[in-house]
Image: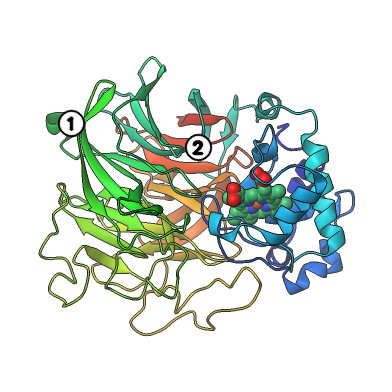
Amino acid sequence: MALWPVGIKKFYHYFTSIASFVLLGLSLVLSGCNGDPEVSDQPEDAEDPDTEIGDVSQTALIYRNNCGGCHGQNLISFVEREWTYGNSPEAILTSIQVGYPNNGMPAYGNTFSEQELQGLTDYILSEIEGKTKAMVEAENPDLSGSTASDDLTFRLETLTDEIPGVPWGIAQLPDGAFLITERGGRLFLISTNRELVEVMGLPEIVAEGQGGLLDVVLHPNFENNSYIYLSYTARNPNNASERTTAVARATFSGNSLDQVENIFTALPYLSSSIHYGSRLTFDTDGYLYVSVGDRGNRDAYPQSLDNHLGKIHRIRDDGQIPNDNPFFNVQGAVSSIYTYGTRNPQGLTRHPVTGAIWEGEHGPRGGDEINRLAAGNNYGWPVISYGINYDGTTFTDLTEMAGMEQPIHYWTPSIAPCGMTFLSGDFYGAWENDLFVSSLKFEHLHRLKMDGNTVTGQEELLEGIGRVRDASMGNDGYLYIVVEGPGRLIRLVPEQ
Ligand code: HEC
């Protein structure tokens, strides 16, 4: 796998084998698919001599732990970049130092020494010199051959590697074709003969920061009504600098959408460009669940029921609010709320046996969570959390409290979990009913081995494949993932 520059790759192999306490010490954990507002800081034990790794430059290490989760471990986001703030050494150093927290770029001025900042600047410039995106993408791993997991051997089948931009959501149509969202604001149809066609007629989408076109799901009765649902970032009609998470319903016919109708808008609109959520999933009764993040305002929204942010919502297929929702009759509460106390939920899926809706969310630094949702529950953000601030300070000493739910599972350090699915069907033997979670930060597919609602083990699959944005069961019984850089739709095929 010639995936990363040699030094980083070597480090990576070392990295996977060193003890987890070193991991803890090293990792400044990122969250969000694209950024987080909190300012990072060096963890105290980062100076621990154990973290000095022989032949790998300290700067590559700093890059890997702090920057690669957002900018690509192969630095792809800097290659052939149209620089917003300039690419002179001074301009880059300034960008790293001051950050652009509103756009998801943390400030590192208090985290690294002058020398380290200079080192990062030189590292970026020297690593990208003379490189094109095509060259970096050509370094992608060889996807042929078999992969052995603990309980299953499988191979990968790439249906397309031509999705431009950041693929985010997957929905398979009854005829076997796929709809894939691209965060930049486009919807693609991957036909059964693997041609990529852009679907027209989308609502106006604001693609900025972590926002853009997010998830896509089909109506449970799609074969009769042709309805699809898109979650996306919508602009405030009354204030162009503000946006929010919204859901549109449309009919899909061939290559375009018709009867596009907004059926959900999370309020308030804010100027923040982070923590939108937003996954969609239907339950077995035909209600649609919509995940909405806290928009980086943890103290204002997630614990208060008078707004839509930091919540999971439950609505009818036409956007109306079911009157058996937990807060339907509560004065002053938003009636679509199903659960609350959530940070940035980019995973939402239905359990194939129990039908319960499960949610995955990015923690701050550490504390990524998997939760099993039940009506009216409070998942505690930010009152209880297993994470800490990016600057190493804590915002809460509490990890549990009466009236607040514990996660089924949490990750510290974070893996930056995005889309997720339970494995259903019987093609995959021992994988059945396990939870597969995409990891942005470590660029792998994370398997949580499950016994009912209990995690019994974990496994990292396809390490280094690229940022995995979604994992989804096709209605053909196969497990699919979408990966960026280049944008690929990949089927995992079990080998007998
Ligand atoms: C949490 C995600 C995240 C992390 C972590 C992160 N960045 Fe960024 N970075 C961004 C985003 C988003 C932007 C674009 C900001 C904008 O356009 O205003 C950006 C912009 C930049 C820019 C300016 C690019 C330009 O177009 O002018 C530089 C340089 C940069 N980052 C370097 C780094 C380095 C070095 C690190 C690690 C020390 C790092 N970043 C960590 C998200 C991140």
Q: Is mark 1 within 8 Å of ligand 1?
A: no
Question: Which mark identifies residue 135?
Answer: none
- Label 1: which secondary element: loop
Please give the residue where the numbered disc 2 appears in the rendered image.
166
Q: Quadrant of the N terminus?
A: top right
Against 404, is 223 above or below? Answer: above
Say which of 310 and 265 sits in front: 265
Please give the name of the residue rendered at 36% of the width and 85% of the height, measured from the top-left corner.
Answer: 402
Against 387, is 494 above or below? Answer: above
Say which of 459 and 395 sits in front: 395
Amino acid type at image mark 1:
Ser
> Outermost residue toward the top?
193
Against 396, is 73 above or below? Answer: above
Q: CA distance from mark 2 to mark 1?
A: 26 Å
Asked whether disc 2 touches disc 1, contact meaning CB atoms under 8 Å apart, the reply is no
User: Could you tell me residue 143's position as x and y percent?
Assistant: 60, 27
